[in-house]
Image (cartoon, rainbow, N blue to C red):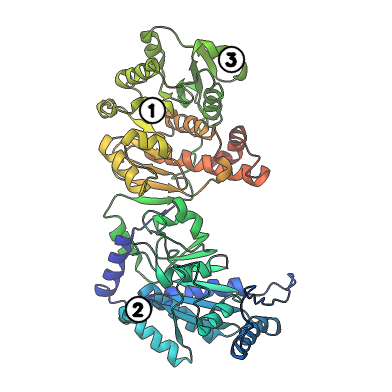
Amino acid sequence: MLPLATAAQMKELDRRAIQERGIPSLELMEHAAQAVADTVWELIQPDESICTSSIGVIVMHKKDAPPPTEEERRQEKEIRAIVESKNTDPTPRVAVFCGPGNNGGDGVACARLLMERGGCHVRAFFVGDRAKMTPDERAIEDRLTAAGGCLEDFSIDLTDRETAEATFTFEQQKISAWLSTCDCMVDALFGIGLTRPVTGPFEAAIRLMNGRTVVSCDIPSGVNADTGEILGEAVRAKVTVTFTRPKPGLYMGEGAVCAGEVRTVDIGIPYDLEFEVLRSAPRVEMLNCPNGGLPRRPRNAHKGDFGKLFILAGSEGYTGAPVLAAKAALRTGAGLVYLGVPREIYPIAAVKCDEAMPFPLPQDYKTILERAQGCDIALIGPGLGRSPETERLVLGLLADLTIPIVLDADGINALSGHIDELDKRTALTVLTPHEGEFARLTGCPLPVGNRLAAARDFAKAHGCILVLKGQGTVTAAPDGSAWVNTTGNPGMAKGGSGDVLAGMIAALLGQKHLRKEGREGDSAAELTADAVFYHGAAGDVCARKLGEYAMLPTDLIEALSQVLREWSEDER
C-alpha cells in the first residue's frame, strides 16, 4: 500500500522541502523530468519484430472549390513532405506540450534531456500565456536554449470544431502535420492544481494528443488530482509518471481511465518529511495489497471460531442474490452461514445451497431477532426487495441487534429517510452502496463528484464504515482513514457482483482470529478494505481466464480460492 497525497498535501511537501530543507526547486524539477524522459525512451525504442509501413498524406479539396493557387500547391507539397519524411527517416519523434506552470517546466526539462540523449527528434511546444510562466520554468527554458533546443509557441485553437481546420495558418498546418508523425507525446500542460475546465489552445493540444502514445507528468492534464473528475477535456495517457506519492484522482472514476499505467517515482523529497506531512491527517492509502494478509488459522479452532453469520436476503424475482452472498461468505472462510429468506423462495434457495443453511423466515419479528442475535454478525439486504414490511423489518433489526451488521442493497434503501437509526447504533455497521444507492441515502446529486471526500464525510458523520463502490472503490472509516482500491475490472459490472462482496465482508469481519480489537484500535475497517481488494483481485483472475465479457459473479466465488491462497500466510 502507498499513502495517497492530495494536491494540497503535495504543495505543502514541495514548499517545505524547498524552504525548510533547502532542496533547490530546479533539482526537484530535473529529477521529475528524468523519470519522464526515461519512460518516454522506453516507449519509443523500436521493436524490430514489428514491421513498419510507410505513411502518406491525403489532401482533399471541396468539390466546388476553385483550383489551388501556385502558393497553395507549394504549401501542400511542403506539408506532404513533412509527413512522408517519416518514411525515409524512421528516427522516433517526440512532441512535448508544456503549460505555463512548473508542470510545464518538467516538460521543458524532459525535452532537453531527450535531446541531449540523442536517438530521437524532439520538439517542445509552449501552450498558454508566456507572461504566466513560473521563474523555474523560465530557468529551465534557458537550459533548453543553451543546449540548442527551442520552446516553440503553440496557438492552435479547436474550440470551433466546424471551422478550426479551415482557419489554420500555414505554420499551424505544418505543426499539425509533424505532430501526426510522432511516436510519443509528453503531456506537461497542467499539474495537480487544475480546478477549472480546459479551454482554448490547451483543449486543442489535448485533442491532438489523444489517440497517440502519451506520457503524462504527475497527472493527465484535465483530470482533477483529488477526485478523478474530468475538467472539460482530459489526456488519455498510456503511462502517467506521478511524483513522490500517487494522487487519489489517478485511481477513481474517469481519472483512472485516463491515467493508464501509473508509475510513482521519487524526486528527492525526504521520506521523513513525507511521513510528517501525510501522517498529520488521517491516512488515505492506495490499496494495491491487503492491509496484512490472512494469518495462519489457529490449529485448535472449530467452526464457531470462524464466525456464525446471519444473512437476511432474497425476495420473489431475486433468488440468486442470497445464494451468491452465502456462497461467497463460505468461500471467504465463514464457519457457519444461516440464510434467512422469505418462505415463498425458500425451496429455491434450499436447492441451491449445500454448505449454507437456509431457512424460511418466521412470521414473528421476535423469532427473527433471536435467530440473528445468536450469531456473530449479520448481513442484511441482498435481493431483499422494497416494501413497507421489509423496511420495518430492516429498521427494527438495526435498532435492536447488538452485533455488527453489514448493510447492502435494499438494506441500504430501507435506511433512506431514516438515517437516525444508523446514528443510534453502537455496534459496528458497514454500508456498501453504489453511487445510486448513496445518492438516495444522502440526497446528493449524481454523479458523486468527490467520491473520496463524500465517503469519508459520511463515515465520520455517522460512525460507520462506508464502502462506496465504483471505479476505485473507496472504503472509509469513522476516524477519517480511507483506502482507494486498485483491483477489479469492467467485467465485474454485472448483477450479483455486489452480493459476492457483501458476503465476503461479513465473512472476514465475523472471524475472531482476524478481527482485532484493543488499544491499537479495531481492525474492522482494514478487513473491510481487504475484502474489497480480494473481490477485485478475483475479478482480475476471472478476466484473465475467461475475458471480461464472459465472466460471471459465480466465477468470482470460484476464483477466491486462488486469491485468498496467494495472500495467506500458509502459502508464504
Q: Nearer the viewer, residue 276 or 99?
A: 99
Q: How many marks?
A: 3
Q: Tell me where residue 8 appears, x and y as whole percent.
A: 29, 61
Q: Nearer the viewer, residue 332 or 129?
A: 129
For numbered disc 2, what is the local secondary structure?
loop
N-term-proximal mark, 1 vs 3:
3
How far apart are labels 2 and 1 at the CA level? 51 Å
Please state which amino acid type lies under the numbered disc 1: Asn
| Residue that numbered label 2 is attached to | 129
| Residue that numbered label 1 is attached to | 413
Please state which amino acid type lies under the numbered disc 3: Ala
Q: Is residue 301 visible?
A: yes
Query: Mark 3: few, some, or many residues within 10 Å (few <14, many ≥20)?
Result: some
Q: Tell me where residue 283 appears, x and y as whole percent.
A: 33, 50
**Any mark on residue 350, and which?**
3
How far apart are labels 2 and 3 at the CA level? 70 Å
**Measuring 49% from the left and 67% from the top, which residue is drawn there?**
161
Taking the image as shown, residue 328 lies to the left or right of residue 509, namely right
Which is more foreground, mark 2 or mark 3?
2
How far apart are labels 1 and 3 at the CA level? 26 Å
Query: Mark 1: few, some, or many residues within 10 Å (few <14, many ≥20)?
Result: many
406 over 522 or under it: above or below: above
Q: Tell me where residue 322 appears, x and y as whole percent.
A: 52, 23
Which is more foreground, mark 2 or mark 1?
2
**Measuring 73% from the left and 73% from the top, which residue is drawn there?**
52
Q: Nearer the viewer, residue 462 or 370?
A: 462
Please state which amino acid type lies under the numbered disc 2: Asp
Query: Mark 2: few, some, or many residues within 10 Å (few <14, many ≥20)?
Result: few
**Measuring 49% from the left and 70% from the top, which residue is drawn there?**
163
Which is more foreground, mark 1 or mark 3?
1
Q: Residue furthest top?
A: 363
N-term-proximal mark, 2 vs 1:
2
